[in-house]
Amino acid sequence: MNRFFLRFITFLFATSLTFGGCTMIEDKTEDCPSGLYVRFVYDYNTARADMFKDHCGHVTLYVYDESGRKVAERSVSHVNGMEPLRKYGYAVHFEDGELPAGRYRLQAVAMQKDWDETLGCNGAKYRRTEVLDSESLRISLDHDDEQISGTNRHQVNAEAPLDTLWHTLKVASYAPQDGRVAPDLHRTVKPFSIYPLEDQYVTVDDARATYATVSLIRDTKHLNITLRDIDDPDNIYDMDYEVILLDDNAHLAHDNEVIRTDSLQYSPYASWTSRLENGGTIIDGNTTAPGQRTAHYNLMFNRISYNADINKSARSQIINRRTNQQVALINLPYTLAEGRIAYDIYNYSPQEYLDREYDYRLDFLLKGGKWFYMDVVINVLSWSKRFQNVEL
């Protein structure tokens, strides 16, 4: 009996060495986690799936003390064939001693590719200020210094698509702990307000591990607009229409709120005409066979805010270059937010839907030189909602 009891105690001790907390072994600590581990998720989307490792190729993390002073900064990018962020649960690690025990605020921004690499590409770019404290981060989208003649708008260079920007949504953390097994990643759940300040803090202890998760929100959006003509279906071409987006959203503050200063004009980075013939779509050519043409426009733009008042909201404007007549002027966030009905089960507010969705589509049917019907389309769900122009 005593022999059995001795073996049992030996088994328990051996098990504790293998699976127990690191504090059980005072002279063997190389495998013991300590310090701060910061991981990232991007599941604030309509798919409600974590897309961070598939979409993000750069992240910069800022750490502030309780007075708001920046005490640490780390950047990680995909460069030279190395793609560390593609590893699920990748963590930025501050070793024990880098951050003294205390309470810290976390803030992160992410991009589709390395930030410095992005600055060397064509088209408009996001630029960030030097960060010294928790309220100094400001991100601005490139635009012309001079206003477009006869307007108060600044043109955004549409030579290439925008690189995608993500900002901090919230931070979640586990209490400092012992043990080698990292806890699960936090998921972004409701209810919460976007960027609640109190939710940005974590607590760090000496000789123990703190695991934190920064949840990201995508600010860069994509919109596809198509035009078809009911009266003359074979006589519509993309070059005959000016399609632009107007908004005062050039700058984002440290809390990801839009700073309404400069008025921007976004233009398509790509436009083309397709032709439906014999049940198939072909790129426009020198054919005279009857058919139906569609004009296509792809635009990218910065974060937009919901407002039912068109005079205080982002607008989408379409002008017929041949007649110089306005074809459409719509309240863009108000219209796009109608897509949330496709996700009724989640009861999204208009702004939450606008922040979760990032790939929009609007189809216009023209009649008599004006838009007659407009469809808000959700491609993934084969869902659409139609609006009719009551002014016709």
Image: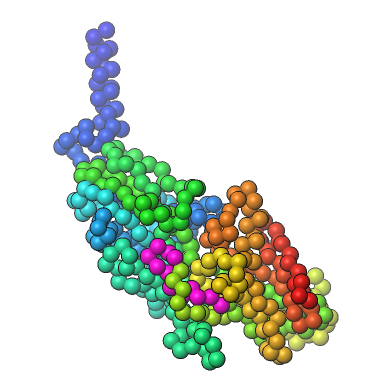
Q: Percent position (x, y) of residue 369?
A: 76, 82
Q: Nearer the viewer, residue 163 or 215?
A: 215
Q: Look at the image and tell me in which quarter the N terminus lies.
A: top left
From the viewer's side, name the closer residue of 384 and 56: 384
Span of residues in magenta:
246-257
- In this picture, residue 287 sits left or right of residue 310: right
Residue depicted at x 51% and y 85%: 152
User: Would you say residue 64 is visible in this rendering?
Assistant: yes
- Residue 302 falls inside the magenta stretch: no
- Quadrant in the picture for residue 110: bottom left
Near-viewer residue (173 or 8): 173
Can residue 113 be seen by looking at this rendering? no
Q: Left or right? Give the position of 378 relative to 22.
A: right
x 33%, y 72%: residue: 129
**Placement of 23 over or under 76, stated as above or below:** above
What residue appears at the point 28 percent right and 23 percent down from the top-left corner?
A: 12
Q: Please provide percent x and percent y for residue 234.
A: 79, 81
Placement of the C terminus among the 4 image quadrants: bottom right
Front-lying residue, 37 or 325: 325
Relative to residue 103, is residue 141 depicted above or below? below
